[in-house]
Image: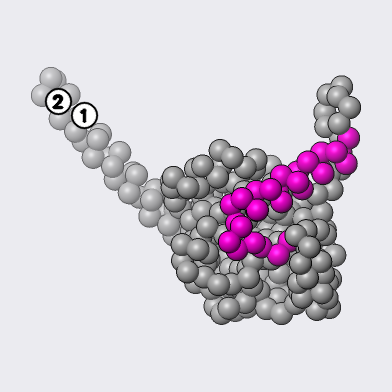
Amino acid sequence: MRARARLAEPLRAVARRLDKRHARRVALAANLLDPPIDLSDHYTDHLGYAIAGMLARGNLWCFDQALRHLPSDAPIVEIGSFCGLSASVLTYYKRRLGLRHRLVTCDSWGFEQAMAGDVPVSRADYGRFVKDSYVRAMQTFAAWDLPYTVEAYADDFFGAWRAGETRSDVFGRSVTLGGPIGFAYVDGNHDYDHAKRDFEHVAEFLEPGGHVLFDDSYDGSGWGVTRLMPEIRARAGWELVARNPNYLFRKR
């Protein structure tokens, strides 16, 4: 009995390793990177310490993949900028990869509710603070390559993009919108209806071979954007590249 017991534990260990390998194969077959790949480095860690935001570490791998495989010199577009954490990371990755693509971002900095609690801080005050934080972050961490940032809701932004309008950005510069898009990072309103409209806008302009990444789209996140993911997977002309754990798609 003792000999049998001594043999049992090594056999169980082998079984566990086989189970893990099988789980890894299943995950890769489903485009799920499990565990998620984290490309954080010293610089991105310090950006996270300094700039308010909720950037998932797995998004860094998705950024890297999308930027390494840009189909042309078309711009990179970010929908939803908040305090500038993701825009700072994208600017860093552009520099690291030697990219000259224009980064165009948009945010309305309009918040639907005032801050919770019995405090005299209005949603307008909150919005001004977040916008000012964004501007300061960009002037510090992207001063050599400022993105063009349009203060607008996503629908208005894409309407201007479709019309080829020239807008003034938050840094006082003129930017002419329009044309193809090489990569889009969708991080605006995470409700299903808003996310779907953002996707339709992006799909209209994204070049074949270009990528789109949806923040907070991971399974079980609780956001409405998750309902959109199976719809895109079933849609002709779109390929799921990975879930890390957020969904990264490529336009065929």
For residue 154, the mark is none
Q: Few, some or many C-alpha atoms within 10 Å of disc 1 (few <14, some 14-19, many ≥20)?
A: few
User: Would you say residue 137 sits in the magenta stretch?
Assistant: yes
Magenta stretch: dominant SS? helix
Quadrant assignment for the N terminus: top left
Residue 121 appearing in the image? yes
**Between 133 and 77, which is closer to the camera in this rendering?**
133
> Are the residues tagged 1 and 2 within 8 Å (C-beta)?
yes
Residue type at tag 2: Arg
Q: Which residues are the magenta region?
A: 122-150
- Eyeballing the image, is 160 above or below 213? below
Cα gap from disc 1 to disc 2, whole angstroms: 6 Å
List the residue tagged with mark 2: 6
Name the residue at 51% across, 42% down: 46
Residue 153: give x, y in percent of width and height.
82, 58
Residue type at tag 1: Glu
Name the residue at 72% across, 54% down: 80
Name the residue at 62% across, 77% down: 74
Residue 8: give x, y in percent of width and height.
20, 29
Residue 44: give x, y in percent of width and height.
50, 47
User: Would you say residue 141 sits in the magenta stretch?
Assistant: yes
List the residue tagged with mark 1: 9
